[in-house]
Image (spheres, helix red, strand yellow):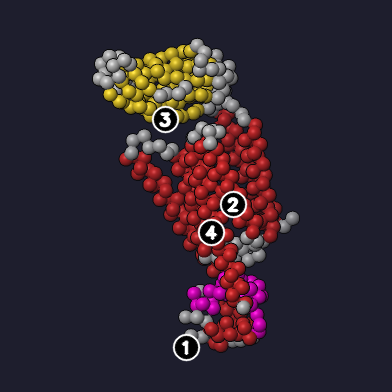
Amino acid sequence: MKNLRLKAARAALDMSQQDLADKVGVSRQTINAMEKGDDNPPLKLCLSICRVLGKTLDELFWEE
Amino acid sequence: MKKKTLASTVLSIIIVSVVILAAGIRCALQPESKDFMQFKSPVIVTDSGVEYELEPIHFEPIGKKVTFDVEIEGPDGIDTEAAIYIGSPDSSSVVKEKISGSGSAKIQVTDADGKDLYMKFIPENSGSLAPSSYNLQFKLKGTSDELKLHSGPLMIAALLLLFGIYVIVTTNRSESKYDERQLAARGKAAMNALIIVMMCCFTYGCLSISIENFPISMYEVGIGSVIVGSTAFAIMCDVNDAFFGLSERRAKFIALSWVMGILALFGAGMTFLGLGRFNEITGTGIVVGICFLILAIELTVKSSIEKKEATDEES
C-alpha cells in the first residue's frame, strides 16, 4: 500500500526524495520504495524520517 | 591514512604478492610448458590416392627440446605420417612418424633451438579402404624444456594489478555506505550469483561426461562461470538499486564496463580477423566481453531510468 502521508509530509516541507534521503543517510531509491509501500523499513530509519519531517510515527506509518 | 584504508591496502598487496609468489613457485617446480590442440579433418579416398586439406600447423618457438604427443583417430587403412619441420614447412623434415589408423606417437625434436616449428600430416591409403569420405580426429599436446617468458603480457598484467590496487584503495577511502535495504538486496544477489556459478559448473560436469570430446575445457568453464556469476551479482544488485553506495558515482564505473567489454571482444575478435589463433583464452575473452557489455548496457539503461525518475519526482 502506498504511503501517501509520507509523500505529503515531505512535499509540505518542499523536500525532494534525494534531500530526505541525504538527511536520513539512505539512498533515494529507499525513500522511493517506502513511499510506494514496497519496502519494510527498520524502526531506526522510520524514527529518523519522523525527526526530519517533524511528525510522529503514528502520523506517518500507522496502517489504518 | 585511516585504519580501514590501510588495512585494505595491506590486504590487497598481500593477496597480489601471494598470487605472484604461488605462480612463480609453480613455474619453478614445473618448468615445462604445455599446449593442447584438437581438430577434425575430412579425407577423401579415391582410386588415385587420398585427397585432404591439412595445412601445416605452426608452433611458436617453445624451447630447444620439444616433445609432441600426437593422437589420431581414424579408420584402419589410412596411415598418417606426422612430420616436423624447423623454421619453414618447405624445409626438410627433421623427424617423421607414421600412425596407422587410430593410434598415438611421441615425436621428439632435440634441436628446435628456439625456432618456429611446423607439423604436417600426410594421410595415405594403405590399400584396404574403399573410395569414400572419412574423418580423421587429431589431438596434439606439446611439452618443452624451456619456460618462455613473454615480457609484453607480463607488463600489462603488472599494470592491471597496480591499477586494481589503486581502485581498491580509492574505493575504500571514499567510504561509500549502503543502507539496510541495499545490504539485504546485496546479500540476496550474492546467494543467487553463487547458485548460478554452481549451476554452470554442474552443467559443464554433466555435458563433459555425456558428450565425448566435449570442446570446452574446465579452465574455460571455471573462469567463465566466475565471470557470469559476478556479472549476475552486479546486475541483480543494480536492478534493486544496491550496487552503488550512497555517495558513489556511477559514471566512471559505467565507462569502465564499456571499455572492458569492447576491449575484451576486440581482443577475442582479432582471432577472427586472422591475427591470432583461436584457443581457450579467446573463448574466455568472448565470455568476458559479452558479460561486461551486458553489464554496461544495464548500468546505462538503469542510470537513464534513475535520472528520469528523479526528474519526474521533482516535477
Disc 3 versus disc 2: distance between alpha carbons?
Answer: 34 Å
Helix, strand or loop at mark 1: loop
Q: Amino acid at mark 1?
A: Glu
Label 3: few (<14), some (14–19) or many (≥20) C-alpha neighbours in 10 Å: few
Q: Chain of mark 4?
A: B
Write down the residue under mark 2: B258
**Of the residues under marks 3 and 2, which one precedes in the sequence?**
3
| Dot placed on the residue nearer the N-terminal end, 4 or 2 | 2
The residue depicted at 52 percent of the width and 24 percent of the height is B59
Residue B161 horizontal/vertical position (percent): 64, 43
- Disc number placed over residue B298 in the picture, else none: 4
Q: Tell me which amino acid carries mark 3.
A: Gln
Bin the neighbour count of mark 2 within 10 Å (Cα to Cα): few under 14, some 14-19, many 20 and up: many
User: Residue A14: percent from the left, percent from the top?
Assistant: 66, 82
Q: Residue at x 34, y 18 (%)?
A: B50
Left or right: B285 as drawn, with respect to B149: left
- Label 1 is found on which chain of the structure? A
Identify the residue position indicated by label 1 in the image.
A64
